[in-house]
Amino acid sequence: MQRRRCNSLEWLEFNLLARIPNITHAVSTRQSTTNFRIDVNDTPLVIANTLEPIKRILDIPKMVLATQCHGTTIATVDTELSIQPHCDALTTKTPGIGLIIKHSDCQATIFYDPVNHAITNVHSGWRGNVGNIYAKTVTTMEHLYNSKAKDLIVCISPSLGPSHFEFKGFRETLPQEFQSFKTEQNMFDFWAIAHWQLTECGILPNNIEIARLCTFEHSQDFFSFRRNATSKRNITIVALR
């Protein structure tokens, strides 16, 4: 990933997306003096004020957030609602709308179709992986935009790494096929699980970028609920130009 800064705002960009001129994206860091973070209990007004400098610096006219309920529902974004209820992914073909996913240890995952110029931003914790929200995203983009899996570019944010993803109740909760990704006692590599799920959908390995930055370990850059039980969240945003 590439580290960027403008005035008081710092963010990270994926290598695969940074070279594409008609898309804007950012993954927040804690190094910004600008308040580039969102609390789970923030009101819509507080969120709007928080996002205002980001909108200005990244030149994104409108921002939309998902409520994120650890499900697999994908909302098609229009220009009416700034917060989309009861969903964990946002998708659009409309330029100028920033799709925002809040995350601490979960994965925020950008899907970009360069052929049909469409984007989806996905929130996936372990429940999202169990429900295979990534497969549902590919199917949804195929249906809405005539996307082809082989064309999609997929980038996964910093998230909880395999050295800190302890899952004590895995036998009762995780599907059997996930258990081959157990790295040691009760530890799981959800980066590898995500990569496997994406390639099973037909995403080409060269079109997948996983940040491989652990939110638990990189305390200077990211909030982590597993580390600090904080209600603060990192955000990942993507918009079409």
Image (cartoon, rainbow, N blue to C red):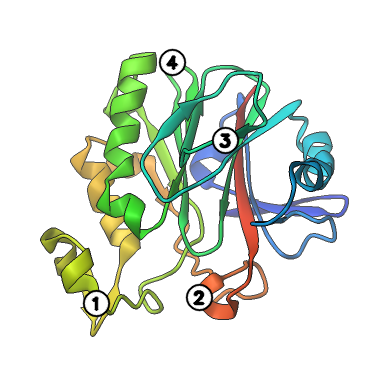
- Pointers 1 and 2 in contact (C-beta within 8 Å): no
Residue picked out by circle 2 = 226
- Is disc 4 placed on a helix, strand or loop? loop
> Mark 2 or 3, which is nearer the eye?
2
Q: Callout 4: 10 Å neighbours few (<14), some, many (20+)? A: some
Looking at the image, is mark 3 or mark 4 earlier in the sequence? 3
Left or right: residue 215 versus residue 42 is left
Question: The residue under label 4 is which amino acid type?
Answer: Asn
Total marks shown come to: 4
- Is disc 3 placed on a helix, strand or loop? loop
Given the current orientation, which residue lies at the most extreme bottom position? 185
Asked where in the image residue 142 lies, by quadrant, the reply is top left
> Mark 3 or 4, which is nearer the eye?
4
Question: The residue under label 2 is which amino acid type?
Answer: Arg
Residue picked out by circle 1 = 183
Looking at the image, is mark 3 or mark 1 earlier in the sequence? 3
Residue 40: horizontal and vertical position, in percent?
Answer: 64, 57
> Mark 4 or 2, which is nearer the eye?
2
> Mark 1 or 2, which is nearer the eye?
2
Residue 168: horizontal and vertical position, in percent?
Answer: 28, 79
- Is disc 1 placed on a helix, strand or loop? strand
Looking at the image, is mark 2 or mark 3 earlier in the sequence? 3
Out of 18 and 227, give the one closest to the viewer: 227
Question: The residue under label 1 is which amino acid type?
Answer: Thr
Residue 56: horizontal and vertical position, in percent?
Answer: 83, 35
> Mark 3 or 1, which is nearer the eye?
1
Residue picked out by circle 3 = 19
Out of 49 and 205, give the one closest to the viewer: 49
Q: Using the numbered discs, state the Cα–Cα distance from disc 4 to disc 2 in whole angstroms.
A: 38 Å
Query: Which mark, by number, is residue 171?
Result: none
Q: Callout 1: 10 Å neighbours few (<14), some, many (20+)? A: some
Q: Using the numbered discs, state the Cα–Cα distance from disc 2 to disc 3 in whole angstroms.
A: 33 Å
